[in-house]
Amino acid sequence: MERFVKDLVLTGLTENEAKVYLLLLKKPLTATRIAKIVGVNRSNVYGIISTLVQKGCVREIDGKVKTIVAINPRIAFNSMKITLRMRIKLMDKLAEELFPYYEAETQKTQKELIKIIHSHGAIIETLEKLEKDAQSEVLAFSKPPYLMDVGNLETLNITQRSSAKRGVRYKAIHQIEPDNIENFIKRLEYFQAIGEEVYVTESLPMKLFIFDGEIAVFTMENQESNLSNFTFTSFENTDLAKTFTQIFDLYLSKSITLEEFIKTNKSQEDE
């Protein structure tokens, strides 16, 4: 009979439940006798018997001493199969009802995956969508070559104008264009006029945008200064966004305001 123990365990019984059931198939026994033969504590035997009763494998016969009797295997396993079919039906039902929760969480998790953007049009579309969705703050490093036509201020950064009106705070550090100072100042004055906090520095390591302290988008570029060589990498990950914010703050501490830059530039021209 021992060879059936493993098979019974596969049907859902524990090893001790299987041993007790096999023992009772030979003849009815009391709990005390079962405990002694199987080698388990008497207190544990009552739990095993109770579970076997629930599973339809045994029944108790009251008398001077309560006796435990095995149920006919054909009847017992038929009862277990009915229970199993009900459990399978319930699992199928739960699989459908719980899937939307998994799907929502999966979509949330997938947002943290890296997004690599190569196309010039896709880069602009992505940045404009992020500006539209921004809720509180956008930080940026701005340096040439530019994605947009910076010579046409009427069409420049329309989404920034719109979100700034909603109260989104824009703060940007711009890399100086020594060979284009007049237009450079004019463009920065425009950004300042639409609400951006404008800062100036001599050199920036990359193009960078940080949205609401949660999303970081930055460029990885080849040595050639050409937009076709740009790869924009987007991370929707708060830890990484915090790291880039620290880099932003480091460069901010070494930058000057637009007014300071204009004043310094005017002094140099007068010399």
Image: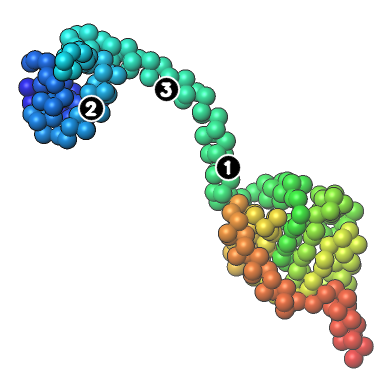
Farthest residue to the bottom: give it. Answer: 271
Residue 105, percent from left and from top: 55, 39
Q: Residues within 10 Å of mark 3 (few under 14, many from 20)?
A: few
Q: Count the marks: how many?
A: 3
Residue 143, percent from left and from top: 73, 66
Q: Which residue is mark 2?
A: 46
Disc 3 is placed on an element classified as: helix
If you read the primary sequence from the N terminus, does the residue marked by circle 2 or circle 3 appear first?
2
Q: Which residue is mark 1?
A: 108
- Which of the two residues, 271 or 244, is positioned nearer the viewer here? 244
- Check if mark 2's residue and mark 3's residue have beta carbons within 8 Å: no
- Which of the two residues, 208 or 183, is positioned nearer the viewer here? 208
Q: Which residue is mark 3?
A: 91
Instruction: Tell me: residue 137, above or below residue 126.
Output: below
Displayed quadrant of residue 37: top left
Residue 260, percent from left and from top: 86, 79
Residue 106, percent from left and from top: 53, 39
If you read the primary sequence from the N terminus, does the residue marked by circle 2 or circle 1 appear first?
2
* Residue beneath the point at 77% across and 47% down: 132
* Residue beneath the point at 18% across and 13% down: 63
